[in-house]
Image (cartoon, rainbow, N blue to C red):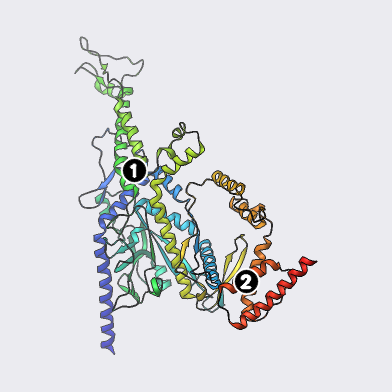
Amino acid sequence: MTEKTDAARRAEKQLVDDVKSDFARRQEERRAIERGWQLNMNFLCGNQYCDVNSLGEIEEDAPGFFWQTRRVFNYIAPTIDMRCAKLNRIRPKLAVRAATDCDEDVRSARISSAVLAAVAERENLDDCITRATIWSETCGTAFYKIIWDNSAGSTIAATEEGELRDGGVKIMPLSPFEIYPAALSEESIEGQPSIIHAKAVAVEDIYAVYGVKLPGRDIDEFSLSPYSASVHSVTRSAPVKAVKHGYEIVIERYERPAEDIPNGRLTIVAGDTLLFDGDLPYINGPDGTRGYPFVRQNCLPLAGGFFGGSVVDRLIPVQRAYNAVKNRKHEFLNRISMGTIAVEDGSVDTDDLLEDGLAPGKILVYRQGGTPPAMLALGSVPAEFSEEEDRLVEEFGKVSGVGEITQSANSFNSVTSATGLQLLIEQDETRLTVSYEQIKSALKAIGRHILCLYRQFSPQMRVMRGAHEDGKAAMLSFSSADLSCDDVVLEADSEINLSPARRRTLMYELMSSGLLSDAQGKLPEGTKNKILTYLGYNGLAAGRDIAALHRARCEEENAKLLKGDVPVKFYDDHALHIEGHTAFILSNNLTAANEAAFERHLDGHKKALKEEQNG
């Protein structure tokens, strides 16, 4: 028995050592990329006199002369702010496309869309995308981790240990510092043989989750290595760093399914302790396979690289040149305004002159027969300084994709047509299209992960809070059979250039053209409510959409008619019910008994409609 225990311990220690050595190897391979990310963060926060030294560490640059000015004129920060502001306008809604016209598929698509909307609101998906976009714009890449949280959802029972909940999806935006791929040259997440997610976690949290007590250390969050103050003081590193005290590095290594591990493998290590070793937990891959719980969002995809490129990378050389031009220009202005004094050797007290200069009204005593001090004529600031400064400002716009139309209103002076202005704005934002598409692709993958997790962890009927189209709260009941994760699509293109004024103008044009009117040329009440909601006047959309309520009741009757007869109510809109029931019959293969029930129900609606028309 003891020999078996010792063998298990040796195997466990070997597994821990293997994971830690694998993590150390990936850290070393990615070190140069990490230093580039840290350099970007320094430039973004305004610490722009630093660079990566020959040892691969970030070091502050020393000034060439003591009198040289080293002011920072940060153009990178407002440029990234403008890009993030534009990218944050991308909020396309996730929807699920029905595979066929069958009512079951349509119902499944509708329920899946409602689940996505409910999870997006509960997890504040907009904020997650915003935080991830900041990382992707700064470092070039950001990640989302989509997991199942058993402590989320509604309470289903109370136990001695606490409340038992039915669980829910949790979405976490991650910085690129936490993800370590097996191959830096593999472009896709699915193509990676394994992925390591490493993070600094408080030892109290590790104990709460895994029941293992660890001593804890000082961890540098960005490099994910033990922090040493003496090493950082020697290298004079840049100020962007984050040190956490009483933490430990938790290493999660995800291995994709293979012939020897058909369900993949997840190994979790902290310190020298094995916390977990087993199959991949989530069935989120194609055709019901297990996969990685990660979604990647790049700023600028790079060919042959797992991590994307950042606009900050391209702006740093321009920013260095701009700082140099501005500082040299100011030094020249200082020389002109303060002057440079020429003094004959021995003619005056140079210490007194150095202290006070040639102050107005100053009595200057110089040696008899000597030459009095004089100001040297330095001329004016060369025009090349201003020309180079303007060229660099223009280059900021060209490199970043945020053009001069956005940065300056002077570009609109030559264009007076509204259509012309709109075309200029669209052309100005064309460079952002690549980043737009990356966010959309990531959002689509997040939606697929959400539905896959609910299919896996909702085998029985469950209830969750959703929302109707009119914004009223509702309870949504479904099971795994009601969800589809194969047809997640974006409902509509994002409103990249659609300002509130442009939105109103477009809606008025649709109304005037008659595209929103019914066959009688009238605007239905339900359409009016949707128009008011689209324009942002939800409070005015107080009218009830009776037709929509009748259609919803008709769908409920369709489900009940599959089990037996349903009586016709006097308040039914019989024409709408006849249309809805007929569509259901035509789009589904019903049994003879079901067809008979529908036939009896339709006869009731037809008789009631005939009585209304004759009466």
Front one among 90 and 233: 90
Which quarter of the figure has residue 600? bottom right
Left or right: 343, with 136 as reference point = left
Looking at marks 1 and 2 on the same chain, the residue that comes earlier in the sequence is marked by 1
Q: Is residue 74 visible?
A: no
Residue under label 1, please give it. 399
Q: Is residue 26 visible?
A: yes
Front one among 332 and 162: 332
Residue appearing at x 50%, y 39% in the figure: 419
Name the quadrant of the C terminus. Answer: bottom right
Q: Residue furthest top?
A: 369
How far from the left and from the top, in percent, is residue 364?
29, 15
Left or right: 584, with 420 as reference point = right
Front one among 82 and 207: 82
Residue appearing at x 65%, y 63% in the figure: 548
How far from the left and from the top, in percent, is residue 500?
55, 46
Which quarter of the figure has residue 371? top left
Front one among 213 and 46: 46
Residue under label 2, please give it. 582
Query: Compared with residue 154, is residue 530 higher up or lower down, i.e. above or below?
Result: above
Distance between the Cα atoms at labels 1 and 2? 59 Å
Residue count near mark 1 (Cα–Cα under 10 Å), binned few <14, some 14–19, many ≥20: some
Residue appearing at x 31%, y 57% in the figure: 307
